[in-house]
Image (cartoon, helix red, strand yellow):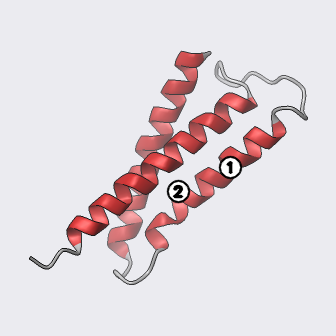
Amino acid sequence: MVSSVIIIGAILAAIVIIVNLVVSKATSKEKFTGYFPSVIVALAGFAFLFMAPIVEKVDMMGAGYGGWGIACLFAAALGFIITSLVESYANVKA
């Protein structure tokens, strides 16, 4: 189960990072629109984590709701970090 959560988190992180960077490059520098995909994935992760103790045990691709929540929050955190690093280096006036 742990390996499936890590794989799901890595795949989600790659997708979120690519979408964040594309949206960030497509919008102006003053807006925070590039972070919205990470926010959506984080909200989905919290929803999965809150559903885990309430709903019956469901196994999707080797991970339950809690595993999906952890994977989504991991992907969102990496998306926030990498997007902020790319934007900060892109806006340096040196």
Rendering quarter of residue 1:
top right
Answer left or right for 34 relative to 74: left
Residue topped by disc 1: 44
Going by the numbered disc 1, the residue's amino acid type is: Ala
Element type where label 2 sits in the image: helix
Give whichever of discs 2 and 1 has the lower sequence position.
Answer: 2
Q: Residue at 41% x, 42% y: name it.
A: 14
Q: Residue at 14% x, 79% y: name it.
A: 93
Mark 2 neighbour class, 10 Å CA radius: few under 14, some 14 to 19, many 20 or more:
many
Going by the numbered disc 2, the residue's amino acid type is: Ser
Tell me the distance, in whole angstroms, between the alpha carbons under discs 2 and 1.
Answer: 10 Å
Please determine whether, in this image, residue 56 is positioned above or below residue 26: above
The C terminus - image quarter: bottom left
Q: How many marks?
A: 2
Answer left or right for 3 relative to 69: left
Q: Residue at 52% x, 49% y: name it.
A: 76
Which label is found at residue 3? none
Rendering quarter of residue 26:
bottom left
Expressed as whole percent of the image width and height from the top left, the position of residue 88 reads 28, 68
Most distant residue in the front direction: 94
Q: Report if the CB atoms under discs 2 and 1 are less than 8 Å apart.
A: no
Q: Residue at 36% x, 62% y: name it.
A: 84
Expressed as whole percent of the image width and height from the top left, the position of residue 60 reads 70, 25
Please determine whether, in this image, residue 1 is positioned above or below residue 51: above
Expressed as whole percent of the image width and height from the top left, the position of residue 12 reads 50, 40
Residue topped by disc 2: 38
Please determine whether, in this image, residue 31 is positioned above or below residue 37: below
Element type where label 1 sits in the image: helix
Please determine whether, in this image, residue 12 is positioned above or below residue 82: above
Mark 1 neighbour class, 10 Å CA radius: few under 14, some 14 to 19, many 20 or more:
some
Expressed as whole percent of the image width and height from the top left, the position of residue 39 reads 58, 60
Of 21 and 70, the residue lying toward us? 70
